Image: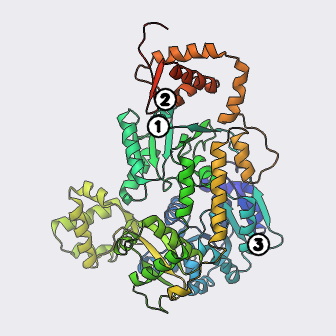
């Protein structure tokens, strides 16, 4: 079948986006391939179409996020494409069923987490499978220079020994030239490998930086002057709720999202936002990966991202439909110092790292010489509480120990509740249970097809609403059905894990080398300084500055960022006296006061002149400033 016909049949598109076909033809010709495509560029099509073009075989996809893995598997199934996944959140029974499907040729895609590749037995089992293509998603994670380094990614090259004839396709949305070269080297790309790179330029997005001393008010102001869906990114869970409540109280319907919410809450809030019931989502960076909402008009960063890579990815969730959109970064005079302090907190002393390694092993009940290749649930909150540890420093130490090869700390993940019937349908007629249990069972059979052939994700809240039973009764009914072996019930859970990659060492022998500590300190420092330079520069196009960071040549001013816009204002020739009069009249309309950001936005592109006029009014006693709010003083004569 022709490639376009496959694209149309399964995805409903008539033609490929730029570079998609080039990458597809490259991997189908057997070339190792690196695809650098911006957020929203359609990376998944580049490996899903080739697999469906092969007459038989299997594509293995290595991806770091279990939630993203689940979404992609579910999306493929909805298109009639059989796919399975293998990750640490699955039960033994689910894993066995997945392997049976793989071995029987009843799956075209296998999604795995990088941690699975640390297991030699797992790699041996893969030899039995007809793997035609190896895909590495979020490939920047494989690089020691990448912004989210994952040691388990270094094992991906082991797949080449298992299936040496299968080409490797590495995909990422953010990679500097150094990272791109490191990815190809670590994945052992062949000499005839190919690299395809789309420009990171998003011509429909205006990148703006605004100085702000009252970010709540400025967020409200920006959203009140724009239309359409929006995301507000912050760096703390507490702020998500505070800003969402402030916006809703101010007449802008908003909700909040962070990793600490229950699975049901996350799904409910994400769906409300995606379907337009909620206009604004205030979120940490836990929100966004894998979300496909094309009509986001505004992305606001109220807190400083730690790198241009992260900022570009998050801001790039605006305007995926190609229509005019805005990415706004709010900065205050304290943000620069706060970002540099974060750098120091990310690198605790080697003495502290060794201590955290020792007490972590004690917490997991590992003796010296034990633990090799064990996957252990790790209650991070309880661990810090038990040993009186500072959370941010402890998390940083665990990541450094991961990079040094002593363990892999797998961040908190949440799995859905799942059910699979373990009896035949005819046997249900002879089962005698209580009324509550029977109501629960009947609801399962009505609401969730496919229970007799596979595990199906369920929602206890939905069952509660359908049956009129409270959730506690539903939960107990499911446990009772599980006890009677009528079904297999896997309740949802949320927990981090530690994969112990080497037997426990005495802490005095734990080495955190220069390449992991000093070199990575410099890498992170350089990234932070690049982010600071982007935010606080007042000359040169912001987009050109960002694209230069990602290694693009032949740059020219974008004409859309705040700096480019400010250059256009010089042609207005508004005198200082005229601007003072305009600002005076404008402030009379707002007796409650205005912020400097609002004022400068009103008089753009003459915002600097407007700011000078505001300062003049304050200095001459015609206006006062109170907590960044400017008000006119009552007077009898102008």
Is residue 102 or residue 180 the one in the foreground? 180
Residue count near mark 3 (Cα–Cα under 10 Å), binned few <14, some 14–19, many ≥20? many
Q: Residue at x 42, y 80 (%)?
A: 359
The mark found on residue 189 in the picture is: 3
Is residue 547 or residue 415 the one in the foreground? 547
How far across and down, in percent of the image, does residue 15 sit? 70, 49
From the viewer's perspective, is 356 left or right of 381?
A: right
Relative to 342, say whether 425 is above or below.
Answer: below
Q: CA distance from mark 3 to mark 1?
A: 50 Å
Q: Residue at x 41, y 35 (%)?
A: 252
Circles 1 and 2, Cβ within 8 Å, touching? The answer is yes
Q: Which residue is mark 1?
A: 214
Q: CA distance from mark 1 to mark 2?
A: 8 Å
Relative to 313, say whether 170 is above or below.
Answer: below
Is residue 494 or residue 245 the one in the foreground? 245
Please name which of the two marks, 2 or 3, marks the residue nearer to the observer. Answer: 2
Q: Quadrant of residue 191?
A: bottom right
Return the disc, 2 or 3, that comes first in the chain's sequence.
3
From the viewer's perspective, is 171 left or right of 435?
A: right
Return the disc, 1 or 2, that comes first in the chain's sequence.
1
Is residue 30 or residue 326 the one in the foreground? 326
Quarter holding the N terminus is: bottom right
Residue count near mark 2 (Cα–Cα under 10 Å), binned few <14, some 14–19, many ≥20? many
Residue count near mark 1 (Cα–Cα under 10 Å), binned few <14, some 14–19, many ≥20? some
How far across and down, in percent of the image, does residue 148 sit? 59, 64
Q: Which residue is mark 2?
A: 595
Relative to 376, say whether 170 is above or below.
Answer: above
Q: CA distance from mark 2 to mark 3?
A: 54 Å
């Amino acid at each position: 079948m022709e490639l376009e016909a496959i694209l149309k049949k399964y995805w409903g598109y008539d033609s490929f986006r730029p570079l998609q076909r080039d990458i597809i033809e490259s991997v189908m010709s057997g070339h190792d391939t690196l695809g650098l495509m911006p957020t929203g560029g359609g990376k998944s099509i580049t490996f899903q179409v080739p697999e469906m073009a092969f007459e038989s075989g299997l594509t293995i996809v290595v991806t770091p996020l279990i939630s993203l893995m689940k979404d992609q598997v579910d999306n493929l199934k909805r298109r009639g494409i059989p796919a399975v996944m293998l990750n640490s959140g699955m039960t033994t029974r689910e894993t066995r069923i997945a392997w049976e499907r793989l071995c029987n040729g009843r799956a075209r895609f296998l999604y795995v987490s990088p941690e699975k590749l640390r297991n030699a037995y797992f790699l041996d089992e893969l030899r039995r499978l007809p793997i035609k293509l190896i895909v590495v998603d979020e490939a920047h994670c494989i690089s020691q220079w990448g912004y989210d380094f994952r040691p388990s990614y270094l094992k991906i090259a082991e797949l080449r020994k298992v299936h040496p004839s299968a080409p490797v396709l590495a995909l990422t949305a953010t990679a500097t030239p150094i990272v791109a070269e490191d990815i190809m080297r670590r994945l052992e790309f062949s000499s005839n490998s190919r690299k395809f790179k789309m420009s990171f330029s998003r011509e429909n997005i205006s990148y703006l930086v605004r100085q702000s001393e009252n970010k709540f008010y400025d967020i409200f102001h920006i959203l009140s002057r724009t239309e359409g869906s929006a995301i507000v990114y912050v760096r703390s869970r507490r702020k998500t709720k505070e800003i969402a409540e402030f916006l809703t109280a101010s007449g802008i319907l908003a909700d909040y999202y962070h990793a600490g919410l229950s699975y049901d809450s996350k799904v409910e809030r994400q769906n409300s936002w995606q379907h337009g019931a909620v206009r604004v989502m205030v979120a940490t960076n836990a929100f966004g990966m894998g979300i496909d909402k094309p009509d986001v008009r505004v992305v606001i960063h109220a807190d400083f991202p730690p790198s241009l890579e992260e900022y570009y990815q998050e801001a790039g969730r605006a305007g995926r439909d190609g229509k005019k959109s805005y990415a706004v970064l709010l900065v205050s005079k304290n943000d620069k110092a706060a970002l540099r302090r974060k750098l120091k907190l990310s690198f605790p002393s080697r003495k502290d790292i060794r201590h955290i390694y020792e007490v972590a092993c004690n917490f997991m009940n590992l003796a010296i010489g034990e633990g090799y290749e064990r996957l252990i649930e790790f209650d991070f909150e309880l661990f810090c509480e038990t040993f009186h540890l500072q959370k941010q420093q402890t998390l940083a130490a665990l990541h450094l120990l991961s990079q040094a090869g002593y363990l892999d700390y797998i961040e908190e993940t949440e799995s859905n509740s799942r059910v699979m019937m373990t009896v035949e349908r005819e046997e249900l007629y002879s089962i005698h249970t209580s009324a509550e249990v029977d109501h629960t069972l009947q609801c399962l059979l009505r609401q969730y097809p496919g229970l007799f052939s596979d595990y199906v994700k369920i929602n206890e809240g939905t069952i509660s609403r359908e049956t009129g039973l409270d959730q506690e009764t539903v939960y107990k009914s499911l446990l009772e059905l599980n006890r009677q072996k009528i079904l297999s019930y896997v309740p949802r859970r949320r927990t981090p894990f530690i994969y112990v990659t080497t037997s426990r060492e005495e802490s005095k022998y734990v080495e955190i080398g220069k390449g992991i500590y000093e070199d990575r300190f410099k890498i992170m420092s350089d990234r932070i300084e690049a982010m600071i330079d982007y935010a606080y520069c007042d000359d040169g196009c912001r987009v050109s500055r960002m694209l230069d960071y990602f290694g693009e040549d032949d740059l020219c001013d974008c004409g859309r960022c705040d700096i480019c816009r400010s250059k256009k204002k010089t042609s207005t020739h508004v005198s200082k006296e005229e601007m003072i009069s305009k600002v005076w009249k404008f402030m009379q309309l707002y007796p409650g006061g205005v912020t400097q950001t609002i004022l400068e936005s009103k008089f753009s592109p003459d915002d600097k002149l407007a700011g000078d006029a505001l300062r003049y009014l304050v200095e001459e006693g015609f206006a006062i400033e109170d907590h960044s709010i400017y008000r006119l003083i009552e007077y009898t004569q102008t």
